[in-house]
Amino acid sequence: MKNVLDIYLKENNTNRYEVAKRANISEQTLSKASKRDPETYTAKTLIAIGKGIGATAGQVLDNLLAIRDSGKLYHATNISELRQKVREQEDEFILEGDFKELIQKIKTSIDFEDKYVRNDFIFPVFEYEGSALFRVLKNNSSTKDEKVIKKLEKDIVNSYKIKILNDSETLFRVKD
């Protein structure tokens, strides 16, 4: 299930952390809610989200349901958001931004006639040490902790199929 709450909050230029601070609700409550269908959110949660973004609980629920029923996906635009989506095992999301080096390395490192391509999705195959993915993650990350970056790389490789949509968007989908 897609994370409807995070899509909604991003559309409103905020995130769970900021809403939790503004609305005096725990970030853990919002995190748990984000994994569920909006129809199951409690009134308290809807009111808090509304308070955090300046909307009524009814408006929040209407917008969350509209997102749920649409084809909208979360657009991660930096390494921090990418890490969050991978850590939370988001079913499907888009990495957006200037990751051309990563995309080019993916294209050139995989034999498109090989068994790793299924329905236009690329099953990433990287040399683990010194891979292009590792270099791009390290160069675009505020953390230079190689262990953190290697873990992210490993999690992406082990958990996701990738589809290159264009020069600035790459779709990540959890492997079946």
Image: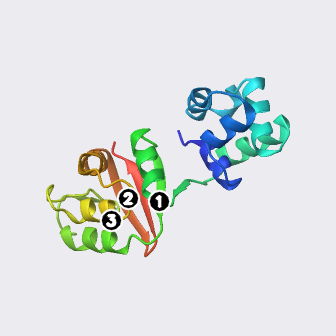
Residue in the image at 19% along x and 58% along y: 125
Q: Quarter of the image holding residue 138? A: bottom left
- Give the label on residue 35, or none: none
Q: Is residue 61 visible?
A: no
Residue in the image at 48% along x and 51% along y: 81
Q: CA distance from mark 3 to mark 1?
A: 11 Å
**1 relative position to 10: left or right:** left
Residue receiving disc 1: 78
Residue 117 lies, in percent from the top left, at: 26, 61
Residue receiving disc 3: 139
**116 relative position to 144: left or right:** left
Of 14 and 68, nearer the camera is 14
Where 33 sits versus 129, above or below? above
The amino acid type, in three-letter code, at marker 1 is Asn
Residue receiving disc 2: 141
Where 56 sits versus 77, above or below? above
Q: Are marks 1 and 2 in contact (CB under 8 Å)?
A: no
Where 27 sits versus 109, above or below? above
